[in-house]
Amino acid sequence: MSRQCTHYGRWPQHGFTSLKKLRPQSVTSRIQPGSDVIVCAEMDEQWGYVGAKSRQRWLFYAYDRIRRTVVAHVFGERTLATLERLLSLLSAFEVVVWIDGWLAAV
């Protein structure tokens, strides 16, 4: 049995203007800083682009594998300054950092 698509040939209209009003949190509210919880998070970066590959965007994030949640994230260039912004968000959690040898962070 096949389903018929009711909007074939045209995209449904959505209120995407409301997305501009979103202000996503850069730090999770699920884990309270200063609590007795020990957070073990992996930090990584992901590359993407907007419109053209010359317009690169990087997402730096810290991911808690135990709770399966992103602890903090920032967007920016792949520079030490962007990494420092992420680390400043994580400073409330009194983190200890080990790196994988990324030359910009050494």
Image: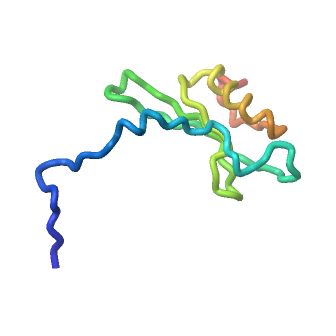
**In front of the other: 80 or 99:** 80
- The figure's colour scheme reads rainbow
Q: Residue at x 46, y 34 (%)?
A: 21
Q: Residue at x 86, y 49 (%)?
A: 35
Q: Residue at x 67, y 31 (%)?
A: 86
Asked if residue 106 lies left or right of residue 49, the reply is: right
Q: Residue at x 48, y 34 (%)?
A: 47
**In front of the other: 100 or 20:** 20
**In front of the other: 56 or 4:** 4
Asked if residue 95 lies left or right of residue 50, the reply is: right
Q: Quadrant of residue 61?
A: top right
Q: Is residue 80 above or below residue 32?
A: above
Q: Quadrant of residue 99?
A: top right
Residue 10 image point, x, y percent: 14, 48
Residue 71 image point, x, y percent: 68, 44
Can residue 16 be seen here? yes
Q: Is residue 72 above or below residue 49?
A: below
